């Protein structure tokens, strides 16, 4: 090698080493970082964690052992040995009464049974004179969840010397819905391609599959629907079932069960039948055989997720049957195997003068009490479609004999993709805390989801689904902060009463920094972010004014389309008199779908929360708001306020170098620059457009638009 060649070689090596070291901070490890605690803290914890006593035996117990050992080793900076008996202080005793004689000896069987196979107890106890920490559950999965909880306590520097906690999930099915297509693309995905590499399966298993399952288990997610609800029948073909089975094998130790989205017309496309009529005996037999086949390959298969008669998908109505006929037929096919059918309520038809916000209720409410015991009806949080803000869906509380399951969207289809920092927990909290008044005061969505008012037959299955935001991007979710939304979904599905503050705090301390003043600052940023996004996108109850198709950026002027309810003007109804969708009795009157007194409050512009004002009312531009300002001025100032938040957030973030590692800091800074740009674009484009109706000047404090309306209309915002 020449000298120059040698030099080049050395430079390459150095470059490589630098890249490799930086790669550690690419966000791949999510909230499961397990980096060494600072020396003093580490010392405190090292006394309480000296060794692990945990049985091997089942895949879930092995996973729990592995996680506990790895996590403790990383955090405490030294290997924690496995020992056979808890004969020293600081032993962590993990397992179930069945698998561990030490846990059996505690005689907790009955109290653990109350916590169920996924619940667990973590308790500091004295065992034959030794101070130990017991992580016990009735089931192996519960022990795994307990191990993750214990690690979280160390990660977040909570005291662990005197523990006494019992935990159990409030909802049974805690599920991610992946809108992943078989070609690797993801509908509404903003973090790369699908994590399921169908072409490589089942022969080759991407190691990421296991990390995905670990991450889910760490927050209690126990189910995942692999493929898009706009489904391709091929995912039910034998070939693809073997691929799905390979994924299920990787997920099983982590307690994550696989579901598949079923295309209703699969008996025709795959089976060559002439119809998919759910009452046709051949169709019934086809699905039964298909279910038997699936369970032969995936014994713990969760069941089917179905989007039927919605946005062009086939369904029972295609064959003049109704939703109950369709759902119950599929339910009967999986019932013998303990499977479930998750039937989506996202159904809307265009009728003259119709209001899309009322459509799901009109289509489905009358079937209350008629769905089979293993059917869950999956209802989006709001009546339209995952908007930055919607009132709760009126079906909540209106179907007491049906197992309703909220569907949230973690991926930010209408909320700035993976470009905008928006923490969704506050939005989901607002929804879960909404009081439907279905059975008097306190009939909140959270309690309904928990089955508190369920009056139907059977077990009263409960659940919550989140449309996933993961993909092949190294940091999983595109935006580092979007990881927090995956995290928040899991925590809320586990316990829908958890506060946003608690979730944000935990996530920040595990993922970014444990320094109290920085935790407080980042937490504030996160907790403010949703309201700020609503301000610069759709304040005061505006909705669905995004650019059509991709839904990024504003296009309130959009008035053409295949269907009226896919235009913006349909939703905002601005004219020279005013703006807003009148859903009261002088308008579409779909407000009556809510129970009194909710409907009365929403119906009265004076009492309607201003955050929903234009959702329910068409009001004059000079309408007096509670602030004393006119509606027009208030609207403009909200947009301005949103921009100011984005600007300040960016400025603060840029100034805080050194709080986290430079790599993630830079990545977030780049995204905040886009967010600020977009917020300005939203404000200017929307206000210029509405100004053509309001004919009023922008109030003091609102900046003049940078471009003309024509310029904004010419091209959608780049993402
Ligand atoms: O939000 C809309 C999306 C569609 C999606 C649909 C649904 C999967 O724009 O992309 O389709 O909702 O929830 O079915």
Image (spheres, rainbow, N blue to C red):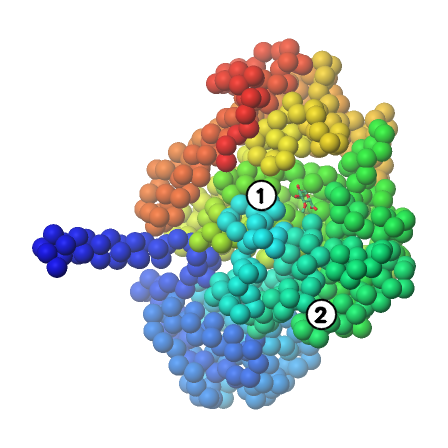
- Circle 1 residue: 412
Say whether residue 453 is visible.
Answer: yes
Q: Residue 623, how many percent across, how many down?
A: 71, 18
Residue drawn where x is 32% and y is 65% of the image: 40
- Label 1's element? loop
As drawn, is 439 to the left or to the right of 414?
A: right
Residue drawn where x is 81% and y is 39% of the image: 349
As drawn, is 157 to the left or to the right of 287?
A: left
In front: mark 2 or mark 1? 2
Residue drawn where x is 71% and y is 75% of the image: 296
Q: Nearer the viewer, residue 707 or 34?
A: 707
Q: Nearer the viewer, residue 355 or 133?
A: 355
User: What number of labels is visible?
Assistant: 2
Disc 2, disc 1: CB below 8 Å? no
Q: Residue 310, how many percent across, how many down?
A: 77, 45
**Quadrant in which the N terminus is drawn:** bottom left
Label 1 residue near ligand 1, CB within 8 Å? no
Say whether residue 505 is visible.
Answer: no
User: Where on the picture, by quarter, is residue 609?
Assistant: top right
Residue drawn where x is 71% and y is 32% of the image: 566
Q: Residue 344, how many percent across, how many down?
A: 75, 51
Label 2 residue near ligand 1, CB within 8 Å? no
Residue 294's disc number: 2
């Amino acid at each position: 090698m020449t000298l120059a060649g040698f030099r080049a070689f050395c430079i390459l090596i150095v470059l490589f080493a630098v890249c490799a070291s930086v790669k550690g901070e690419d966000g791949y490890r999510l909230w499961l970082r397990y980096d060494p605690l600072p020396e003093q803290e580490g010392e405190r914890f090292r006394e309480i964690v000296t060794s692990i006593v945990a049985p091997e035996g089942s895949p879930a117990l092995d996973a729990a052992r592995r996680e506990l050992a790895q996590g403790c080793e990383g955090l405490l900076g030294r290997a924690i040995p496995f020992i056979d008996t808890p004969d020293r202080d600081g032993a962590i005793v993990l397992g179930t009464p069945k698998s561990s004689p030490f846990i059996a000896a505690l005689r907790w069987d009955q109290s653990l049974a109350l916590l169920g196979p996924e619940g667990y107890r973590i308790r500091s106890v004295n065992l034959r004179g030794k101070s130990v920490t017991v992580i016990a559950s009735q089931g192996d999965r519960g022990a795994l969840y307990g191990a993750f909880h214990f690690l979280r306590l160390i990660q977040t520097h909570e005291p662990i010397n005197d523990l006494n906690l019992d935990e159990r999930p409030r909802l049974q099915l805690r599920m991610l819905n992946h809108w992943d297509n078989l070609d690797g693309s993801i509908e509404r995905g903003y973090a790369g391609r699908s994590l399921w590499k169908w072409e490589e399966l089942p022969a080759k298993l991407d190691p990421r599959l296991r990390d995905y399952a670990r991450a889910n288990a760490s927050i209690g997610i126990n189910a995942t629907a692999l493929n898009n609800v706009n489904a391709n029948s091929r995912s039910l073909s034998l070939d693809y079932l073997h691929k799905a089975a390979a994924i299920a094998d990787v997920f099983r130790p982590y307690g994550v069960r696989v579901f598949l989205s079923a295309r209703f017309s699969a008996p025709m496309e795959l089976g060559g039948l002439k119809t998919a009529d759910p009452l046709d005996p051949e169709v019934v037999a086809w699905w039964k055989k298909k279910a038997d086949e699936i369970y032969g390959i995936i014994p713990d298969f969760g069941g089917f997720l179905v989007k039927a008669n919605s946005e062009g998908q086939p369904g029972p109505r295609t064959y003049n049957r109704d939703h109950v006929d369709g759902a119950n037929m599929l339910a009967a096919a999986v019932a013998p195997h303990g499977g479930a059918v998750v039937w989506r309520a996202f159904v809307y038809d265009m009728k003259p003068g119709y209001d899309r916000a009322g459509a799901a209720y009109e289509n489905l409410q009358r079937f209350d009490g008629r769905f089979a015991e293993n059917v869950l009806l999956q209802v989006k949080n709001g009546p339209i479609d995952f908007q930055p803000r919607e009132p709760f869906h009126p079906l909540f509380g209106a179907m007491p004999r049906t197992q309703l399951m909220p569907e949230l969207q973690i991926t930010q289809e209408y909320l700035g993709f993976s470009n905008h920092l928006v923490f969704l927990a506050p939005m989901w909290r607002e929804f879960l805390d909404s009081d439907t008044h279905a059975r008097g005061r306190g009939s909140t969505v959270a309690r309904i989801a928990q089955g508190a008012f369920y009056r139907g037959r059977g077990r009263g299955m409960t659940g919550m689904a989140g449309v996933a935001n993961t993909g092949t991007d190294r940091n999983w979710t595109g935006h580092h902060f979007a990881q927090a939304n995956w995290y928040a979904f899991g925590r809320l599905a586990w316990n829908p009463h958890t506060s946003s503050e608690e979730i944000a705090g935990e996530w920040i301390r595990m993922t970014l920094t444990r320094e109290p003043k920085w935790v407080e600052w980042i937490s504030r940023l996160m907790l403010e972010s949703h309201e700020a996004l609503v301000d610069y996108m759709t304040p005061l109850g505006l909705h669905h004014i995004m650019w059509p198709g991709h839904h990024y950026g504003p296009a309130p002027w959009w008035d053409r389309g295949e269907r009226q309810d896919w235009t913006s003007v349909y939703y905002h109804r601005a004219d020279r008199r005013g703006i807003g969708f009148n859903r009261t009795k002088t308008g579409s009157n779909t407000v009556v779908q809510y129970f009194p007194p909710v409907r009365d409050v929403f119906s009265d512009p004076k009492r309607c929360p201003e955050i929903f004002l234009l959702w329910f009312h068409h009001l004059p531009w000079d309408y007096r708001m509670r602030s004393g300002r006119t509606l027009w001025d208030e609207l403009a100032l909200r947009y301005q306020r949103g921009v100011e938040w984005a600007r300040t957030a960016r400025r603060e973030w840029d100034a805080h170098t050194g709080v986290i590692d430079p790599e993630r800091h830079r990545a977030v800074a780049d995204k905040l620059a886009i967010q600020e740009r977009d917020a300005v674009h939203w404000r200017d484009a929307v206000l210029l457009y509405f100004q053509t109706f309001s004919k009023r000047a922008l109030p003091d404090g609102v900046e003049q638009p940078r471009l003309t309306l024509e310029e904004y209309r010419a091209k959608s915002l780049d993402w």
